[in-house]
Image (cartoon, rainbow, N blue to C red):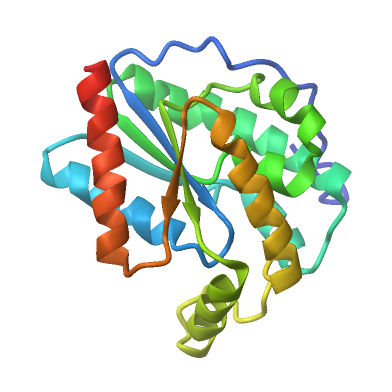
């Protein structure tokens, strides 16, 4: 919801941790910018569609809502107010769960989300606040974190800018090598969460997807 000045009003947050998923499958892909996570998410969605599965491929911040577009605009302008971004991301995620992801899961769909609450842990919160924050939301069946060095990530980011592959040519505040190095360390600290799998994304995309599909099928065999 926006006020008369166009600023979004943050509502009091609730809890979605006990939502029923029915027979759906909830997969999150995460990692620093330049890790190749979005390509892997798209490949995974196509992998399931070829198997005649009903897939919802989605993203955070959302790109179909005013709030999601507002968040992305603020990021590209260089806004680095952690408290403000935390509130905005939280509000966007709650609406995303309520309006899209939980209904899809209840209908038995495979939901693949490019970024989720793990991004908030890495980008906005200190480690001592991780558990209390992440437990406010529905936990995915699998959270695949794609790991690559900050140096390699920057090479990929710069290459994609030159090739005009990115929606924005200007690098965001989150696309600086020093910052990426810090984020990478925080993502690797998340391996303690039972749903997290760390995947080396330094090889070519096809090799990385072999690891992706292996982890997903392993989970499906164990919990089918």
Left or right relative to 164: residue 188: right
Left or right relative to 31: residue 43: left
Residue drawn 73% across and 57% down?
182
Q: In this view, does 193 lie above or below 191?
A: above
Q: Is residue 191 above or below residue 153?
A: above
Q: In which quarter of the image is the N terminus?
A: top right
Q: In this view, does 212 lie above or below 150?
A: above
Residue drawn 36% across and 23% down?
105
Please tell me in which quadrant of the rendered image residue 101 appears.
Answer: top left
Measured as percent of width and height from the top left, residue 99 is found at 51, 28
Measured as percent of width and height from the top left, residue 15 is found at 65, 15
Left or right relative to 179: residue 203: left
- Counting every numbered tag in the picture gives 0
Q: Which of 164 and 211 is in front in this view?
A: 211
Q: In this view, does 161 lie above or below 11?
A: below
Residue pushed farthest left?
A: 51
Measured as percent of width and height from the top left, residue 26 is found at 39, 29
Q: Which of 83 and 184 is in front in this view?
A: 184
Q: Can residue 67 be seen from the camera position used here?
A: no
Q: Quadrant of the C terminus?
A: top left
Measured as percent of width and height from the top left, residue 52 is found at 12, 38
Residue drawn 42% across and 66% down?
202
Q: Can residue 41 be seen from the camera position used here?
A: yes
Residue drawn 51% across and 48% down?
30
Residue pushed farthest bottom?
A: 162
Q: Which of 81 and 33 is in front in this view?
A: 33
């Amino acid at each position: 919801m926006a006020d008369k000045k166009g600023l979004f009003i943050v509502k009091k947050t609730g809890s979605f941790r006990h939502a029923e998923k029915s027979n759906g499958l909830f997969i999150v892909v995460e990692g620093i910018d330049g890790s190749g996570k979005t390509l892997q998410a798209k490949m995974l969605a196509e992998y399931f569609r070829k198997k005649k599965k009903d897939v919802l491929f989605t993203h955070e911040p959302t790109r179909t809502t005013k709030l999601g577009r507002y968040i992305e605009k603020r990021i590209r302008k260089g806004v680095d107010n952690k408290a403000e971004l935390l509130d905005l991301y939280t509000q966007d995620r709650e609406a995303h769960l309520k309006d899209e992801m939980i209904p899809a899961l209840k209908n038995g769909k495979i939901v693949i989300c490019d970024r989720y609450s793990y991004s908030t842990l890495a980008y906005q919160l200190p480690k001592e606040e991780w558990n209390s924050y992440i437990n406010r939301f529905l936990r995915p069946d699998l959270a695949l974190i794609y790991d690559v060095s900050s140096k390699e990530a920057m090479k990929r980011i710069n290459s994609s800018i030159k090739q005009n592959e990115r929606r924005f040519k200007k690098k965001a505040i989150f696309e600086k090598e020093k910052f990426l190095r810090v984020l990478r360390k925080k993502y690797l600290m998340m391996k303690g969460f039972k749903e997290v799998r760390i995947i080396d994304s330094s090889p070519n995309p096809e090799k990385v997807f072999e690891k992706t599909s292996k982890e997903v099928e392993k989970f499906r065999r164990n919990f089918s």
